[in-house]
Every structure is written in C-alpha cells, then in structure tokens.
Amino acid sequence: MAGVELLVRGGLLVDGTGAPARPADLAVAGGRVTVLAPGSGADGAGERSVPVLDATGLVVTPGFIDVHTHSDALAAVGEPAAVGESAAVADDKDTAWGALEELRLAPLLQGVTTEISGNCGSSLFPCLPERLPELAEHLRVTFGIGPVGPAEDFAAFAAAQRPELRRNHLASLVGHGTLRAGVMGFADRPPRPEELDAMCGLLDRALAQGAAGFSTGLIYPPGTYADTEEIVALARVAARHGKPYVTHLRDEMSQVEKALEEALEIAARSGAPLQVSHHKTAGRHAWGATLRTLPRLEQARADGLDVLCDVYPYTAGSTVLHAMLPPWASEGGIGALLERLRRPEVRERIRADIAGGVDGWENTVGNGGWDLIAVAAAPARRAAEGHRIAELAAAGGVDPVDYVCDLLLDSQGEVTIISHSMREDDVRRVLASPLSMIGSDGVPKPGKPHPRWAGSFARVLGHYGRDEGLLSLEDAVHKMTGLPAARFRLAGRGVVRDGAVADLVVLDPDAVRDAATFEQPLLPPRGVAAVVVAGQVAVRDGRPTDARAGEVVRVR
C-alpha cells in the first residue's frame, strides 16, 4: 500500500450504484480511491503512520451530489467589509462573515461534496461585455450576498472562485435568464435573429469551457418572456455538447401538466436530455397531480426520451419575493420594477392580477394566499424574517400587496421567501420515483433560509428512508450519487470504485437525520461522522476541519 494517504476501514460500503451494501475497506492515494477486501486495510508493517478513518459499524458512501443549488456566489465573495455592507446580517462585519461561513458549511456537514449551481435560469455568466453593468444589479438581487459581478463566460466564472473558501466542489449550468439579459436586457419580446445567434454563441462557448448544461427558469423574468422556439434553439446547442436541458417549468401549479408538455416538446425537438427541476405540483389546484405527471414522465422515457427529475424532501419551496408579482412588473429589470412599485395604480393592477390571474403566469399567491408566504431574508427588515406576509401586513394595518411593495423598496428588491404550497403525498411520490434524484434547491442567503440547504440529504436518509421506509439505503444513496453523476457527466464521481475521485461520506445509518428547522434553518444534521473531499478529511466527528480541497468541476 505504498503511497496511501488515508485508510477507511471497517465500514459497510454502499457504492452508489444501487447494489447491496457490502463490507469493504478503502485506500486513498493522490485523491483517488482503491477498494480493498474487508480487513486488508488494517495497519501493517511500515503503514502505522497512515491516517485512518475507523468506519466500524458505519456506512461508507460516495460524496453526495446536490444537483440543484443557488450557491453560485458563495465562494466568490469579496472581503468581509464588503459582505457586511451588502448582506446586512449585522453591524459587526465579522459576524456577517461568520454567517456566510455557516452557509458554506451547511451542505458539507450533511455529506454534499459536489454542488451544481446555475439552476432556474440564473448563473453568474455569460454576458456580452457591454451588458455587464446592467446584469450586475439583477444578480445582486438574485444571489444577494455581496458585490459579486457577472462574468463573460464560464472560464471567468471559474477563475473568480476563491480556493480558500471552496470546501467542496462546484459545477455550474448556464442560466438562460442570465444569458438572455446578458445579450438583450430585460425586454419582454422575442430575440432578434442576431440576438439569438449571440445567445447561442455564448452558450456554446460556456459549454465548451466546461459548463454542465443549460437551465431555464420560466417563471422568472426575463426567462418568462421567452417562447418555446427560443428555448428549443438554445437547447439544441446543449444537445450538440451532449449536455442536459434543465428546467424550472413555466408553471408548477394549476398548469403544471401543460408546462410539462412544453418541456417534453423542447427535449424532443432539440435532442437534449431533459432534467425537470424540483418536480412538484404546488398550490391547491395542482395537489395530487403527481398521479398524472410521473406516469407521463415514465411514458416519455419508455418512448425513448432521456428525461429525469430532481426533488427536495419538503412541502415548502423558496424563491425571490418579486417572483410573486406578475411578469409585466419586472420588465426592464430590477430598477424598473422598483420604480413601478412606488405608484398606486401599479399596486392596484398587481392586486387585480393576483385575484384574477394572467394568462401564462403561475400566480403563486392566487393559488394559495399571502398567509402561506413567509419572509426568509430581508436585509432592511430583519424583524420580518420568519414571519408570514399576511401576519406582517395585518400587524401593520396595511394590505399585503402594499406591504410587499414597501418591503421590496426598502430592501432594493433583495428579499427571499418561503412558500408553503405542497402536499406530503405528492412529495413522497416524487421521492419514490425511479426517475428522481435529490437536489436541495438551496438558496443560501443570510437570514432564515429554507432548512433544505442544511437538511435535505440527511432528511431523505433518515426520515424518508429509515423511518418511513420509502426508500432503501442503497436506493437513497444512488439518488444522491451515481444517478446524478451519470446525468451530469461528472466523471469519476458518484460511485466508489477503483480510480474514482476520493469524495466519501461516513455515516451512521441508525442515527442520520436532519436537525434544521424553519426556526433554526442551519442546524447541522446528526449521524454524519466524516466527509472526505478529494482525499482530504473535510469533516471529522461531525465537525469541519481546515481542509479546503474543493475545485470547480469542468464537464467535458
């Protein structure tokens, strides 16, 4: 065992393929794994100096892959002083910096060794040089954690990541909303031929540089302004690279089935593999629709379409507050939105559209109500965090729409919310589907973020897997490792085999569970004993070490 830098011995290996668990020892050298027969990793002559992780009575798995995050900027943030000014988590900027470090640690402590960002049409790249200043304001509101500007392409994005902050690996999709804004701004119109050509060219370059796929967020301006033809043209570029089209559907509520058909059409016409993001049927008009959407996905796959989905294990979602407003309100970008919100006639129109609906708009509030929407992060009104909009408006004696408009104005648009809009039986069906993998959809902003950022993977393993019996341990791990690695072409990851990247998790299957709650959303999970990133022990005895072995993953 010459050259071995770490031994993991005595554990039960769940290798990520879905195969039954088996005893095995592991040796790590040069950041890669060799699988050993059980007991052969015991110390021998000359090997007593090799560090050992004792996994006796525990399970060893590949590092988990979070296929759906919004953590694009967490490891590209500037100095603590600048962070404090933007995040406004406290007057003490050291506290602000500590809050961001807590956000960075949350996925690692539950075993996530690779995150895929750039989802829902929002990435930090690409952009034409002349559009960079305009796009910066949009990204500030989207990511909300400091002065991180947009990049012209994937290579520049990768270069902006700071190795001293990178505890795990990061891959990124190309966000359609960013791409569209980076070429044609925030206009509600189809692209001109030369604009579509420019978008295709930027997408092609980013994918060639190593971006993992192409994403849309078709409820979010400016993505919502795009028609099917525009998305088909761009998805064809992804198809040429063999990379997936990843979509937040145009509607996940009352029109979810129609929106799913659009996604399937885009995949069929473009030839791109289809990944349906955080598949759900939300709002009272769509509860129970998974009884139809999941068989539809299965039929499409049986007919030869490469379609899969991801899911988070909660009945509440999270997004930006301005997405609760009709799309016309955001035409022209954040600055134009905020200017409109000052006008009484605009507020009246918003109220009317929420009450009556707008053709083609998801209308989250109309499908549920302001009593189901809680404030997650609001830099200008910290006291509002954790409280529901209806409650806050009533306490202030104002109409909820007026409260929302004033909150957005006070916070310069930088407000995120949690929407309690789903039903447990729908979540369980998607989790159990053989087509689903796990993604947190984490929105890591200071305040009271959704607990899914810190709890999704442990919750699947503990609550839904062990306690509810919805998934076997092997199936749950496969949904977190081998399945997403294959979908996103993450070579050498997701399966523990000889030569694989040494990203590993050591956990207690009888103890693992999530601890994060809506009241305390960043509490670390229980039962995750150790995490290894690229051969370095990043978590030991449930606590982070000083290791910084994460890297930007380039998908070729």
Image (cartoon, helix red, strand yellow):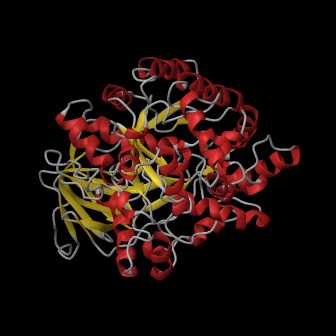
Q: In the image, is 113 to the left or to the right of 338?
A: left
Q: How many marks?
A: 0
Foreground residue among 231 and 298: 231
Residue at 54%, 30% in the rendered image:
355
Foreground residue among 411 and 257: 411
Q: In the image, is 307 to the left or to the right of 463?
A: right
**Residue 93 visible in the shown view:** yes
**Residue 494 visible in the shown view:** no
Quadrant including the N terminus: bottom left
Foreground residue among 290 and 45: 290
Residue 476, image x and y in percent?
31, 38
Residue 78, image x and y in percent?
52, 77
Residue 101, image x and y in percent?
37, 70
Q: Quadrant of residue 288?
A: top left
Residue at 51%, 24% in the rendered image:
254
Residue 133, image x and y in percent?
71, 67
